[in-house]
Image: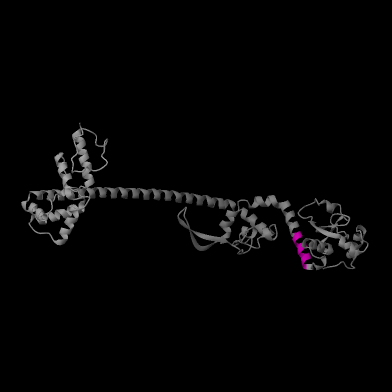
Amino acid sequence: MRKLGNGHWDRKLIERMLEISISPDIDEALKEWKATGECWWPSLGNTNPPEWVRESRTGVGYCLCGHAIYYHFAIENTENGTKECVGSDHINAYMIARAIADELGVAPETISDDKIADWIKVRVKNMKADAWWEENGDWWNEMIDGLRPVDQWLNWKKTGELEYDSVYRWNIEKKIPRKRAEGKFGERNYQMASVFWRWDNPENSRNQMASRGYPNDALIADVTFLSFKKPAYLEHEKSQNKRRLNRLEQIRLDEAARLERQKRMAEERKERERLRQIQLKKHEENRALALDEFQQSMTFRKMCKFYGSPTIISAYAYDSASLMRLRNFADTLAKGEQLEDYALTQLASIMSNKRRVTEKQVKFIKDLGGEIRGPITRKEASAYIETLLAERDGRDAEAEPTNQPYSLSERPQNRSD
Protein backbone atom coordinates (compact mmCIF):
# COMPACT_ATOMS: atom_id res chain seq x y z
CA MET A 1 0.00 0.00 0.00
CA ARG A 2 1.43 3.36 -1.05
CA LYS A 3 2.42 5.68 1.80
CA LEU A 4 3.01 9.39 1.81
CA GLY A 5 6.66 10.26 1.22
CA ASN A 6 8.96 13.31 1.41
CA GLY A 7 7.98 14.85 -1.93
CA HIS A 8 6.75 18.42 -2.05
CA TRP A 9 3.06 17.61 -2.57
CA ASP A 10 3.13 14.72 -0.06
CA ARG A 11 4.64 17.04 2.57
CA LYS A 12 2.04 19.71 1.80
CA LEU A 13 -0.76 17.16 2.21
CA ILE A 14 0.68 15.99 5.55
CA GLU A 15 0.95 19.56 6.74
CA ARG A 16 -2.63 20.47 5.88
CA MET A 17 -4.15 17.18 7.11
CA LEU A 18 -2.47 17.69 10.50
CA GLU A 19 -4.03 21.14 10.65
CA ILE A 20 -7.58 19.73 10.35
CA SER A 21 -7.09 16.40 12.18
CA ILE A 22 -7.44 15.63 15.88
CA SER A 23 -4.12 13.83 16.36
CA PRO A 24 -0.83 15.71 15.90
CA ASP A 25 0.87 12.48 14.77
CA ILE A 26 0.64 11.91 11.03
CA ASP A 27 0.26 8.12 11.27
CA GLU A 28 -2.59 8.48 13.76
CA ALA A 29 -4.06 11.43 11.88
CA LEU A 30 -4.25 9.41 8.64
CA LYS A 31 -6.27 6.78 10.47
CA GLU A 32 -8.91 9.45 11.17
CA TRP A 33 -9.61 9.91 7.44
CA LYS A 34 -11.73 7.74 5.20
CA ALA A 35 -12.68 7.93 1.52
CA THR A 36 -16.45 8.38 1.11
CA GLY A 37 -16.68 6.97 -2.42
CA GLU A 38 -17.90 10.28 -3.84
CA CYS A 39 -16.07 11.63 -6.88
CA TRP A 40 -16.55 14.38 -9.42
CA TRP A 41 -14.88 15.61 -12.59
CA PRO A 42 -15.55 18.75 -14.67
CA SER A 43 -16.05 17.08 -18.06
CA LEU A 44 -18.51 17.80 -20.87
CA GLY A 45 -19.24 21.30 -19.71
CA ASN A 46 -20.24 20.30 -16.19
CA THR A 47 -19.67 23.52 -14.26
CA ASN A 48 -21.77 22.69 -11.25
CA PRO A 49 -19.48 20.85 -8.78
CA PRO A 50 -20.98 19.37 -5.61
CA GLU A 51 -20.84 21.26 -2.33
CA TRP A 52 -17.96 19.21 -0.89
CA VAL A 53 -15.82 20.34 -3.87
CA ARG A 54 -16.90 23.99 -3.71
CA GLU A 55 -16.38 24.19 0.07
CA SER A 56 -13.00 22.42 0.06
CA ARG A 57 -9.99 24.28 1.50
CA THR A 58 -8.22 24.73 -1.86
CA GLY A 59 -11.34 25.00 -4.04
CA VAL A 60 -12.44 23.54 -7.38
CA GLY A 61 -9.64 22.02 -9.44
CA TYR A 62 -7.17 21.55 -6.58
CA CYS A 63 -6.18 18.79 -4.18
CA LEU A 64 -5.93 19.50 -0.47
CA CYS A 65 -2.17 19.55 -1.03
CA GLY A 66 -2.61 22.46 -3.46
CA HIS A 67 -1.75 20.53 -6.65
CA ALA A 68 -4.05 21.01 -9.69
CA ILE A 69 -6.33 17.98 -10.25
CA TYR A 70 -8.93 16.73 -12.72
CA TYR A 71 -10.63 13.97 -10.73
CA HIS A 72 -11.94 15.06 -7.32
CA PHE A 73 -12.36 12.50 -4.52
CA ALA A 74 -14.12 13.17 -1.20
CA ILE A 75 -12.48 12.20 2.09
CA GLU A 76 -13.97 12.65 5.56
CA ASN A 77 -12.45 12.81 9.03
CA THR A 78 -14.42 10.32 11.09
CA GLU A 79 -13.42 12.06 14.34
CA ASN A 80 -14.53 15.63 13.65
CA GLY A 81 -16.69 15.30 10.50
CA THR A 82 -14.51 17.53 8.34
CA LYS A 83 -14.90 16.83 4.62
CA GLU A 84 -12.15 17.58 2.10
CA CYS A 85 -11.16 16.99 -1.53
CA VAL A 86 -8.04 15.23 -2.87
CA GLY A 87 -6.84 14.08 -6.29
CA SER A 88 -6.19 10.57 -7.58
CA ASP A 89 -2.49 10.69 -6.56
CA HIS A 90 -3.40 11.21 -2.91
CA ILE A 91 -6.64 9.25 -2.69
CA ASN A 92 -4.83 5.94 -3.20
CA ALA A 93 -3.51 5.91 0.29
CA TYR A 94 -4.66 4.93 3.75
CA MET A 95 -8.10 6.53 3.49
CA ILE A 96 -9.07 4.21 0.60
CA ALA A 97 -7.68 1.23 2.44
CA ARG A 98 -9.81 2.10 5.43
CA ALA A 99 -12.94 2.47 3.31
CA ILE A 100 -12.36 -0.92 1.71
CA ALA A 101 -11.44 -2.47 5.06
CA ASP A 102 -14.66 -1.22 6.62
CA GLU A 103 -16.64 -2.73 3.76
CA LEU A 104 -14.88 -6.10 4.04
CA GLY A 105 -14.49 -6.14 7.81
CA VAL A 106 -10.68 -6.56 7.75
CA ALA A 107 -7.66 -4.53 8.90
CA PRO A 108 -6.61 -1.65 6.59
CA GLU A 109 -3.04 -3.00 6.50
CA THR A 110 -4.26 -6.06 4.60
CA ILE A 111 -5.58 -4.03 1.62
CA SER A 112 -3.28 -4.29 -1.39
CA ASP A 113 -2.40 -1.63 -3.95
CA ASP A 114 -4.33 -3.62 -6.57
CA LYS A 115 -7.54 -3.37 -4.55
CA ILE A 116 -6.98 0.35 -4.08
CA ALA A 117 -6.43 0.75 -7.84
CA ASP A 118 -9.62 -1.20 -8.56
CA TRP A 119 -11.55 1.00 -6.12
CA ILE A 120 -10.41 4.12 -7.96
CA LYS A 121 -11.06 2.57 -11.38
CA VAL A 122 -14.65 1.66 -10.55
CA ARG A 123 -15.46 5.07 -9.14
CA VAL A 124 -13.83 6.93 -11.99
CA LYS A 125 -15.74 4.73 -14.45
CA ASN A 126 -19.04 5.41 -12.70
CA MET A 127 -18.24 9.10 -12.44
CA LYS A 128 -17.50 9.32 -16.17
CA ALA A 129 -20.64 7.40 -17.02
CA ASP A 130 -22.86 9.55 -14.81
CA ALA A 131 -21.41 12.74 -16.23
CA TRP A 132 -21.79 11.49 -19.82
CA TRP A 133 -25.42 10.50 -19.33
CA GLU A 134 -26.25 13.78 -17.66
CA GLU A 135 -24.84 15.63 -20.64
CA ASN A 136 -25.79 13.31 -23.54
CA GLY A 137 -28.40 10.86 -22.30
CA ASP A 138 -31.44 12.42 -23.97
CA TRP A 139 -29.59 12.91 -27.26
CA TRP A 140 -28.28 9.34 -27.27
CA ASN A 141 -31.64 7.73 -26.48
CA GLU A 142 -33.27 9.76 -29.22
CA MET A 143 -30.47 8.82 -31.62
CA ILE A 144 -30.76 5.05 -31.13
CA ASP A 145 -34.57 5.02 -30.99
CA GLY A 146 -35.87 2.88 -33.86
CA LEU A 147 -32.39 1.89 -35.08
CA ARG A 148 -32.41 -1.74 -33.96
CA PRO A 149 -34.23 -3.02 -37.10
CA VAL A 150 -31.99 -0.78 -39.22
CA ASP A 151 -28.96 -2.34 -37.55
CA GLN A 152 -30.29 -5.83 -38.24
CA TRP A 153 -30.94 -4.90 -41.86
CA LEU A 154 -27.47 -3.49 -42.55
CA ASN A 155 -25.17 -4.96 -39.92
CA TRP A 156 -26.36 -8.55 -39.54
CA LYS A 157 -24.96 -11.17 -41.88
CA LYS A 158 -26.67 -14.24 -43.34
CA THR A 159 -25.68 -17.69 -42.06
CA GLY A 160 -26.97 -19.86 -44.90
CA GLU A 161 -29.26 -21.66 -42.43
CA LEU A 162 -32.98 -21.58 -43.20
CA GLU A 163 -35.87 -21.25 -40.78
CA TYR A 164 -39.51 -21.94 -41.67
CA ASP A 165 -41.92 -19.10 -40.97
CA SER A 166 -45.31 -20.67 -40.24
CA VAL A 167 -47.16 -17.35 -40.63
CA TYR A 168 -45.99 -16.59 -44.17
CA ARG A 169 -45.22 -20.25 -45.01
CA TRP A 170 -41.79 -19.63 -46.47
CA ASN A 171 -38.18 -20.15 -45.48
CA ILE A 172 -36.15 -17.28 -44.07
CA GLU A 173 -32.38 -17.26 -43.94
CA LYS A 174 -31.11 -16.77 -40.40
CA LYS A 175 -28.90 -13.75 -39.65
CA ILE A 176 -26.49 -13.00 -36.83
CA PRO A 177 -24.87 -9.71 -35.80
CA ARG A 178 -21.57 -8.84 -37.49
CA LYS A 179 -19.14 -8.71 -34.59
CA ARG A 180 -16.20 -7.17 -36.46
CA ALA A 181 -16.20 -4.35 -38.94
CA GLU A 182 -15.05 -4.98 -42.52
CA GLY A 183 -13.10 -2.17 -44.17
CA LYS A 184 -12.55 1.27 -42.69
CA PHE A 185 -15.03 3.92 -41.66
CA GLY A 186 -15.67 6.33 -44.51
CA GLU A 187 -14.57 3.93 -47.23
CA ARG A 188 -17.02 2.70 -49.83
CA ASN A 189 -16.80 -0.96 -48.84
CA TYR A 190 -17.07 -0.26 -45.11
CA GLN A 191 -19.36 -2.66 -43.25
CA MET A 192 -19.66 -1.73 -39.62
CA ALA A 193 -20.01 -4.20 -36.81
CA SER A 194 -23.51 -4.36 -35.33
CA VAL A 195 -23.90 -1.25 -33.19
CA PHE A 196 -26.28 -2.96 -30.76
CA TRP A 197 -23.99 -5.97 -30.45
CA ARG A 198 -21.35 -3.53 -29.26
CA TRP A 199 -23.74 -1.40 -27.22
CA ASP A 200 -26.01 -3.60 -25.09
CA ASN A 201 -26.25 -7.17 -26.42
CA PRO A 202 -26.27 -9.42 -23.29
CA GLU A 203 -24.46 -12.17 -25.22
CA ASN A 204 -21.51 -9.84 -25.67
CA SER A 205 -19.55 -9.84 -22.39
CA ARG A 206 -17.73 -6.69 -23.51
CA ASN A 207 -20.75 -4.62 -24.52
CA GLN A 208 -20.12 -0.97 -23.76
CA MET A 209 -23.24 -0.45 -21.69
CA ALA A 210 -21.94 -2.95 -19.10
CA SER A 211 -18.18 -2.46 -19.47
CA ARG A 212 -17.92 1.36 -19.50
CA GLY A 213 -21.46 2.66 -19.05
CA TYR A 214 -21.52 4.95 -22.11
CA PRO A 215 -20.57 4.60 -25.82
CA ASN A 216 -17.10 5.28 -27.14
CA ASP A 217 -16.42 7.65 -30.03
CA ALA A 218 -16.32 4.87 -32.65
CA LEU A 219 -19.75 3.60 -31.64
CA ILE A 220 -21.19 7.11 -31.62
CA ALA A 221 -19.82 7.69 -35.14
CA ASP A 222 -21.35 4.44 -36.42
CA VAL A 223 -24.72 5.16 -34.80
CA THR A 224 -24.74 8.61 -36.36
CA PHE A 225 -23.98 7.11 -39.77
CA LEU A 226 -26.63 4.43 -39.25
CA SER A 227 -29.26 7.05 -38.46
CA PHE A 228 -28.85 8.46 -41.99
CA LYS A 229 -29.75 5.00 -43.34
CA LYS A 230 -33.11 4.95 -41.52
CA PRO A 231 -35.13 6.47 -44.43
CA ALA A 232 -33.73 3.85 -46.82
CA TYR A 233 -34.61 1.12 -44.33
CA LEU A 234 -38.18 2.46 -44.01
CA GLU A 235 -38.56 2.29 -47.81
CA HIS A 236 -37.17 -1.24 -47.78
CA GLU A 237 -39.53 -2.24 -44.98
CA LYS A 238 -42.44 -0.68 -46.85
CA SER A 239 -41.75 -2.92 -49.86
CA GLN A 240 -41.28 -5.92 -47.56
CA ASN A 241 -44.60 -5.25 -45.85
CA LYS A 242 -46.28 -5.12 -49.25
CA ARG A 243 -44.62 -8.44 -50.12
CA ARG A 244 -45.81 -9.93 -46.83
CA LEU A 245 -49.37 -8.70 -47.39
CA ASN A 246 -49.34 -10.18 -50.89
CA ARG A 247 -48.10 -13.43 -49.43
CA LEU A 248 -50.88 -13.50 -46.82
CA GLU A 249 -53.45 -12.78 -49.54
CA GLN A 250 -52.06 -15.60 -51.65
CA ILE A 251 -52.20 -17.93 -48.65
CA ARG A 252 -55.83 -16.89 -48.09
CA LEU A 253 -56.72 -17.56 -51.73
CA ASP A 254 -54.88 -20.90 -51.69
CA GLU A 255 -56.66 -21.90 -48.50
CA ALA A 256 -60.04 -20.91 -49.94
CA ALA A 257 -59.28 -22.90 -53.11
CA ARG A 258 -58.21 -25.88 -51.00
CA LEU A 259 -61.42 -25.78 -48.96
CA GLU A 260 -63.45 -25.46 -52.16
CA ARG A 261 -61.67 -28.50 -53.61
CA GLN A 262 -62.33 -30.45 -50.43
CA LYS A 263 -65.99 -29.45 -50.50
CA ARG A 264 -66.31 -30.41 -54.17
CA MET A 265 -64.54 -33.73 -53.62
CA ALA A 266 -66.78 -34.45 -50.62
CA GLU A 267 -69.87 -33.70 -52.69
CA GLU A 268 -68.57 -35.91 -55.49
CA ARG A 269 -67.89 -38.73 -53.03
CA LYS A 270 -71.37 -38.28 -51.59
CA GLU A 271 -72.92 -38.39 -55.05
CA ARG A 272 -70.90 -41.49 -56.00
CA GLU A 273 -72.00 -43.13 -52.80
CA ARG A 274 -75.62 -42.20 -53.49
CA LEU A 275 -75.45 -43.68 -56.97
CA ARG A 276 -73.70 -46.75 -55.60
CA GLN A 277 -76.45 -47.25 -53.04
CA ILE A 278 -79.07 -46.85 -55.78
CA GLN A 279 -77.25 -49.45 -57.85
CA LEU A 280 -76.91 -51.77 -54.87
CA LYS A 281 -80.58 -51.32 -54.10
CA LYS A 282 -81.46 -52.11 -57.67
CA HIS A 283 -79.31 -55.25 -57.61
CA GLU A 284 -80.86 -56.17 -54.30
CA GLU A 285 -84.38 -55.74 -55.67
CA ASN A 286 -83.51 -57.84 -58.70
CA ARG A 287 -82.12 -60.61 -56.49
CA ALA A 288 -85.16 -60.45 -54.23
CA LEU A 289 -87.54 -60.60 -57.20
CA ALA A 290 -85.66 -63.51 -58.74
CA LEU A 291 -85.60 -65.34 -55.43
CA ASP A 292 -89.32 -64.88 -54.80
CA GLU A 293 -90.13 -66.14 -58.31
CA PHE A 294 -88.68 -69.53 -57.35
CA GLN A 295 -91.79 -70.06 -55.18
CA GLN A 296 -93.60 -71.00 -58.39
CA SER A 297 -91.24 -73.92 -58.87
CA MET A 298 -92.51 -77.25 -57.53
CA THR A 299 -88.96 -78.59 -57.50
CA PHE A 300 -87.77 -75.64 -55.42
CA ARG A 301 -90.53 -76.14 -52.83
CA LYS A 302 -89.83 -79.85 -52.59
CA MET A 303 -86.08 -79.27 -52.09
CA CYS A 304 -86.78 -76.73 -49.34
CA LYS A 305 -89.04 -79.27 -47.65
CA PHE A 306 -86.34 -81.92 -48.17
CA TYR A 307 -83.93 -79.86 -46.09
CA GLY A 308 -86.55 -79.10 -43.43
CA SER A 309 -86.68 -75.44 -44.34
CA PRO A 310 -89.69 -73.26 -45.01
CA THR A 311 -89.97 -72.18 -48.61
CA ILE A 312 -87.13 -69.69 -48.95
CA ILE A 313 -88.22 -66.15 -49.77
CA SER A 314 -86.28 -62.88 -49.99
CA ALA A 315 -87.81 -61.60 -46.74
CA TYR A 316 -85.79 -64.17 -44.78
CA ALA A 317 -82.61 -62.26 -45.66
CA TYR A 318 -81.56 -59.64 -43.14
CA ASP A 319 -78.87 -57.93 -45.26
CA SER A 320 -77.50 -57.84 -48.80
CA ALA A 321 -74.97 -60.59 -48.18
CA SER A 322 -77.55 -63.04 -46.81
CA LEU A 323 -79.91 -62.17 -49.69
CA MET A 324 -77.21 -62.99 -52.27
CA ARG A 325 -76.50 -66.33 -50.61
CA LEU A 326 -80.18 -67.25 -50.45
CA ARG A 327 -80.48 -66.34 -54.12
CA ASN A 328 -77.62 -68.71 -55.01
CA PHE A 329 -79.01 -71.49 -52.82
CA ALA A 330 -82.45 -71.11 -54.41
CA ASP A 331 -80.98 -71.38 -57.89
CA THR A 332 -79.33 -74.68 -56.93
CA LEU A 333 -82.48 -76.05 -55.27
CA ALA A 334 -84.70 -75.03 -58.21
CA LYS A 335 -82.56 -77.28 -60.39
CA GLY A 336 -83.20 -80.17 -58.02
CA GLU A 337 -79.58 -80.26 -57.01
CA GLN A 338 -78.36 -80.82 -53.48
CA LEU A 339 -76.41 -78.20 -51.59
CA GLU A 340 -72.78 -78.66 -50.66
CA ASP A 341 -71.96 -79.01 -46.97
CA TYR A 342 -70.61 -75.46 -46.70
CA ALA A 343 -73.79 -74.14 -48.34
CA LEU A 344 -76.00 -76.09 -45.94
CA THR A 345 -74.01 -74.60 -43.04
CA GLN A 346 -74.51 -71.09 -44.40
CA LEU A 347 -78.22 -71.71 -45.04
CA ALA A 348 -78.72 -73.00 -41.49
CA SER A 349 -76.87 -69.99 -40.13
CA ILE A 350 -79.10 -67.57 -42.04
CA MET A 351 -82.35 -69.29 -41.13
CA SER A 352 -81.40 -69.46 -37.42
CA ASN A 353 -80.14 -65.90 -37.19
CA LYS A 354 -82.00 -63.94 -34.54
CA ARG A 355 -82.11 -60.84 -36.70
CA ARG A 356 -84.07 -62.67 -39.39
CA VAL A 357 -87.80 -62.02 -39.72
CA THR A 358 -89.95 -64.90 -38.42
CA GLU A 359 -92.44 -66.92 -40.47
CA LYS A 360 -95.20 -65.64 -38.16
CA GLN A 361 -94.24 -62.04 -38.83
CA VAL A 362 -94.28 -62.66 -42.58
CA LYS A 363 -97.74 -64.23 -42.35
CA PHE A 364 -99.08 -61.46 -40.11
CA ILE A 365 -97.82 -58.78 -42.53
CA LYS A 366 -99.56 -60.52 -45.42
CA ASP A 367 -102.78 -60.86 -43.37
CA LEU A 368 -102.69 -57.10 -42.76
CA GLY A 369 -102.34 -56.47 -46.48
CA GLY A 370 -98.68 -55.65 -46.37
CA GLU A 371 -96.02 -56.79 -48.79
CA ILE A 372 -92.36 -57.42 -48.16
CA ARG A 373 -89.61 -58.21 -50.60
CA GLY A 374 -85.92 -58.17 -49.96
CA PRO A 375 -83.92 -58.06 -46.70
CA ILE A 376 -85.82 -57.15 -43.55
CA THR A 377 -84.87 -57.72 -39.94
CA ARG A 378 -87.13 -58.87 -37.15
CA LYS A 379 -87.08 -55.38 -35.63
CA GLU A 380 -87.94 -53.76 -38.96
CA ALA A 381 -90.79 -56.22 -39.43
CA SER A 382 -92.21 -55.26 -36.01
CA ALA A 383 -92.12 -51.59 -36.97
CA TYR A 384 -93.82 -52.38 -40.29
CA ILE A 385 -96.52 -54.32 -38.44
CA GLU A 386 -97.09 -51.33 -36.15
CA THR A 387 -97.55 -49.09 -39.18
CA LEU A 388 -100.01 -51.51 -40.79
CA LEU A 389 -102.02 -51.82 -37.58
CA ALA A 390 -102.15 -48.03 -37.22
CA GLU A 391 -103.42 -47.71 -40.78
CA ARG A 392 -106.03 -50.33 -40.15
CA ASP A 393 -107.15 -48.73 -36.87
CA GLY A 394 -107.08 -45.18 -38.20
CA ARG A 395 -104.46 -43.82 -35.74
CA ASP A 396 -101.02 -42.28 -35.88
CA ALA A 397 -98.36 -44.94 -35.52
CA GLU A 398 -95.84 -42.47 -34.09
CA ALA A 399 -98.29 -41.17 -31.48
CA GLU A 400 -98.67 -44.55 -29.75
CA PRO A 401 -95.47 -46.55 -30.42
CA THR A 402 -95.17 -49.99 -28.94
CA ASN A 403 -92.27 -50.64 -26.59
CA GLN A 404 -91.63 -54.20 -27.74
CA PRO A 405 -91.97 -56.05 -31.08
CA TYR A 406 -95.26 -57.89 -31.29
CA SER A 407 -95.24 -61.50 -30.23
CA LEU A 408 -96.95 -63.27 -33.09
CA SER A 409 -98.06 -66.15 -30.90
CA GLU A 410 -101.00 -63.92 -30.13
CA ARG A 411 -102.17 -61.45 -32.72
CA PRO A 412 -102.99 -57.98 -31.38
CA GLN A 413 -106.71 -57.32 -31.10
CA ASN A 414 -108.38 -54.53 -32.97
CA ARG A 415 -107.78 -51.43 -30.83
CA SER A 416 -110.76 -49.49 -32.15
CA ASP A 417 -113.04 -50.85 -29.47
In this view of the protein, which residue sits in the foreground, 126 or 316?
A: 316
User: How is colour applied across the structure in the image?
Assistant: one colour
Estimate the x, y position of residue 82 in percent, counting from the top left.
87, 55
In this view of the protein, which residue sits in the foreground, 333 or 62?
A: 333
Q: Is residue 163 left or right of residue 381?
A: right
> Which quadrant, please, contains the C terminus?
top left
**Residue most extreme to the front:** 410
Question: Which stretch is magenta?
Answer: 114-124
> Which quadrant, please, contains the N terminus?
bottom right
Q: Is residue 154 left or right of residue 414?
A: right
Say if the magenta span includes residue 115: yes
- Label count reads 0
Estimate the x, y position of residue 114 in percent, counting from the top left.
77, 67
Relative to residue 13, is residue 140 depicted above or below? above
Say if the magenta span includes residue 152: no
Q: Is residue 91 left or right of residue 167?
A: right
Q: Is residue 243 left or right of residue 303?
A: right
Q: Quadrant of residue 115?
A: bottom right
Q: Quadrant of residue 130?
A: bottom right
Q: Main secondary structure of the magenta part?
A: helix
In this view of the protein, which residue sits in the foreground, 260 or 349?
A: 349
Estimate the x, y position of residue 150 in percent, counting from the top left.
58, 54
**Residue most extreme to the left:** 298
Point 64% across, 58% down: residue: 200
Q: Let me know if residue 36 appears in the view.
A: yes
**Residue most extreme to the top:** 417
